[in-house]
Amino acid sequence: MDLHTDVCIVGAGPAGALLGFVLASHGISTVLIERYGSVEKEFRGEHLNSDAVQVLKKYRVFEKIKERGILAMKRVEYFYQNQRIKVMDLDEEEGNVSIHFPHGNLLQVLIEESKKYENYRILMNTTVLDLCQNKEGSYIGLTAKSGDEIITIHSHCVIGADGRYSTVRKIADIPTEIIKHGYDVLWAKIPAPTHWDPTIRLALVNHKQLALFTQTGGFLQIGWNIEEGAYFDLIKQPFEPFITELLEVFPELTNTVRSNIQSWRDFVNLRVQSCRCSTWVKDGLSILGDAAHTMSPTGAIGVSAALKDADILGEILIEACKQNDFSTFKLKEFEHRRRDEIEKLQAEQLEKEVNYV
Ligand SMILES: Cc1cc2nc3c(=O)[nH]c(=O)nc-3n(C[C@H](O)[C@H](O)[C@H](O)COP(=O)(O)OP(=O)(O)OC[C@H]3O[C@@H](n4cnc5c(N)ncnc54)[C@H](O)[C@@H]3O)c2cc1C
């Protein structure tokens, strides 16, 4: 199959799905490819901050996501062992929000809204294989695989929105510095006890950070930091002393934890690393979201950063399409508008990981 489009985006995560919508709604022909057949994921970023809410409101999709169920957090509480040591109220009026949304709902709304435009096409179960360049070195499309079929997509610009292990970034040979954080995270999702407040609870338990995120639908997501690379040694140890540490800080979770977390198998291990890239753009190509700057889980800001990227890059690509200019010089404006904020956020994450509160 041979397709021709203005912009080809790889990856239907928050960055790629929103960018696809922004471009399609501005009359730009857009092809979005996604390697999986569904946008549902078990553990992914599910909190939006004020910046992300503003972006979604700007494109009039926030209300549609809200209709499918969101939950605004009332406050963030910090615990040291089992003492509450600090409370931070969250207030939309003051531009300080944390809203839980199911990841799949956000992506489904963005994709459904995009499909209303004839100039938009999404290819699921389609994985990028290689990038195409002209003789001057500009990127002019890609080849992808869908089942046994090889698809060639010719475009003015290729966008890598393909997450932390970005294939586009690798093929385009963009140097990447991996930042280690010294910890990995064990994740679990359990039903919240009745009358559990919509609150984010953070605790420091025996020098390890533990986060409880209240979720819409009556769930709690637990993120528990463990020493980097320690998972396989940890699961050889008895489980009971480990889970008891959680229950000593939050005894009100005893019933739900006992019913839903019985062994190491009930946790999923996420390897934590963030990254920095020396550039986000080349002639005819840009990366964004986790592909350009993977964030650590601290502060739950990965999705919000990806959505804000898509907003800014969308504006630049709309202009680039009008001017038919996809040069590094033109696309570099994206970095000029986003890089300082991203580097500041990454530095704040590292600081919070050391200082906790
Ligand atoms: C387990 C886990 C928990 C997290 N928890 C939080 C949290 O609580 N809060 C928060 O804000 N952030 C969290 N994050 C981070 C957050 O999910 C990311 O920052 C955010 O999703 C980045 O969006 P993105 O669109 O850039 O990339 P992604 O969401 O990673 O999307 C990339 C998309 O590209 C597709 N893709 C990848 N390779 C290819 C290919 N070769 N061809 C075609 N498609 C491809 C993928 O399937 C995926 O759909 C978490 C991440 C993980 C892994």
Image (cartoon, rainbow, N blue to C red):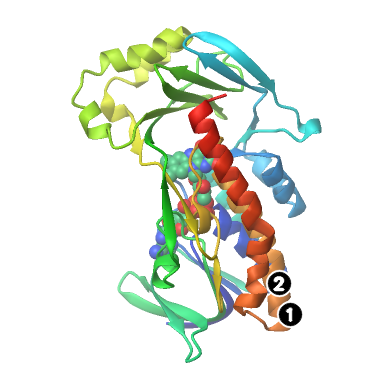
Position of residue 310 measured from the top left corner of the image (x, y, whole percent): 63, 59
Q: Nearer the viewer, residue 220 or 325?
A: 325
Q: In which quarter of the view is residue 245 placed? A: top left
Position of residue 113 measured from the top left corner of the image (x, y, whole percent): 65, 58
Q: Nearer the viewer, residue 171 or 206?
A: 206
Label 1: element kind: helix
Position of residue 339 measured from the top left corner of the image (x, y, whole percent): 62, 56
Mark 2 and 1 residues: CB-CB less than 8 Å, in contact? yes
Label 2: element kind: helix
Decide: few, some or many residues near mark 1? Use Cα within 10 Å; few <14, some 14-19, many ≥20.
few
Residue pointed to by mark 2: 318
Decide: few, some or many residues near mark 2? Use Cα within 10 Å; few <14, some 14-19, many ≥20.
some
Using the image, determine if residue 143 lies above or below residue 200: below
Q: Residue at x 52, y 54 (%)?
A: 293
Residue pointed to by mark 1: 322
Q: Residue at x 65, y 33 (%)?
A: 98
Q: Residue at x 62, y 16 (%)?
A: 86
Q: Pick out the residue farthest to the left.
A: 236
Q: Pick out the residue farthest to the bottom.
A: 135
Q: The N terminus appears in which quarter of the rendering?
A: bottom left
Using the image, determine if residue 192 lies above or below residue 276: above
Q: The C terminus appears in which quarter of the rendering?
A: top right
Q: Residue at x 34, y 11 (%)?
A: 244
